[in-house]
Amino acid sequence: MSDAAPSRLDLLRQWVAERHGLPCQAVDLRLAAGDASFRRYYRLRLPSGDTRMLMDAPPAQEDSCPFVTIARRWAAAGLPVPALHGVDLAQGFLELDDLGDIPLQSCFGREGDGTTLDWHERAIALIHELQNRAGPVELPPFDADLLGRELDLFPEWCLGEWLEMDTPPGWEALREALIVSALEQPVVTVHRDFDAMNLMVQEGTLHLIDFQDAVAGPISYDLISLLRGRYCRFDATRFAAWVEAFRARAQAEGRLPARVDAAGFLAQAQAMAAQRSLKVLGIFCRLTLRDAKSGYLARLPHFLAHLEESLAGLPGHEAFEAWLTGTLRPALLARLGETP
C-alpha cells in the first residue's frame, strides 16, 4: 500500500465529491486550460448534465483571496463575471460558472474586418461599464513603485537575462516620463490584463475572467491592453479614433476632466501603451527563462512593433527610438533565430 501523498488532482476530486455528495470515482473532470501562472482549470460535468469550471490554484504559489473578493464585488455591481459556487481558500479550490470555450480572440477575423472591429467596440463598452460600476477604492494602487517594477522587467529580463545587452541611452528618462504620464491620469478600476483571452463569449455576451490582479490605476490602461494586445495590430488612424471616442464618453460620464483634450489624451494613451509593451517584453522573457513556459518568445516581435508604434507618438525619446530600430530589433530577431 502506497504512502504517497495525494496529488492536487486527487484532492480536487475529493473536494468535489464531498461538495456534491458523489463517490470520488464518479467525479467527471477534464483538464480545460492552464495559464501563465500556476493555476489550472478543469471542467466538471455533474450528473445532471450541468457543467462547472474548477480552478486549482495552489496556495503556496497563488493567493485566490483577491479573485474571490473581486468576483463577489463585481457581481454585486452587475458586471458579467463567473458566479462562485464553491470556495476553499485553504486548499486553493474554486468552483465557478462554466463560461464555455470561446475566448474573444476566436471571434476575430482579419484585423480590419467588420466583425473584428465590432467585437472591439463591444469590449471597449465593457471597459466603460467596469469603470462606471466598480469603484477602485478597495483595490491596490497602481502607483509609481508598481509602474517602475513593471518597467524594470524589460532591462532585467529581456535585455540582461535573454539578450545579454546593456541598458540603452535614454532609458532612465523614458522610464520616468512613462511613470509621470500614467500618474497624471484619473484613477479608476483597472482589470490589468484586459486582453481578448480574458474575455469569454457566451451567448453573445462578453464575460470577464482572470481579474485577480485588478488595481486602482490609470483610466487608459485597460483600453491599451485591448487595442495593443497580443492578437491584433491596428493602424494609427484606427487606434486614434478609438482613443478619441473613449475620451469623449469618459468625459460625458464624468470619469475624465473636460480640460483633457484629444491630443493630450492620445499622448497619455501612447505613453501607457509604451509602458505596457515594455512590461510585456520583460514578462515574456521571464516566463520563458525562469518559469520554463513555452510559446512566449515568438510573440516578442509583435510587442516590439507595438512599442515602436507607441513611441512614434511621443516626442523627446529619439535616442531610445533609434536604439530600438538599430540595435534591439536586429538583436532580438537574430536571437529568436537561434532559439529552438
Image: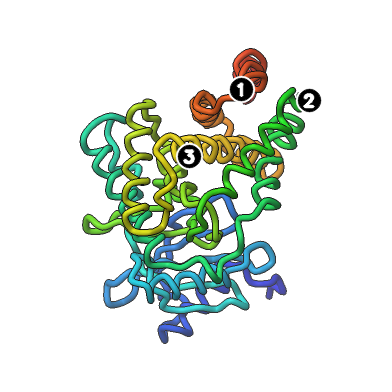
Residue 311, above or below 48: above
Which numbered disc flags the more N-terminal residue, 1 or 3? 3
Which numbered disc flags the more N-terminal residue, 2 or 3? 2
Residue at coordinates 78% horizontally, 25% vertically from top-left? Answer: 166
Q: Characterize the local packing of mark 3: few (<14), some (14-19) or many (20 or more) Cα atoms within 10 angstroms.
A: many
Identify the residue under disc 1: 336
Identify the residue under disc 2: 166
Left or right of 179, for residue 165 = right
| Mark 3: amino acid | Ala
Q: Characterize the local packing of mark 1: few (<14), some (14-19) or many (20 or more) Cα atoms within 10 angstroms.
A: some
Measured in 3D between alpha carbons, the distance from the residue under mark 2 to the one under mark 3, in whole angstroms, is: 28 Å
Specify how the rendered protein is coloured: rainbow
Q: Residue 171 appears at what percent x and percent y? A: 71, 30
Snapshot quadrant of residue 156? top right
Identify the residue under disc 3: 269
Residue at coordinates 44% horizontally, 75% vertically from top-left? Answer: 72
| Mark 2: amino acid | Asp
| 1 vs 3, front mark | 3
Residue at coordinates 53% horizontally, 69% vertically from top-left? Answer: 137
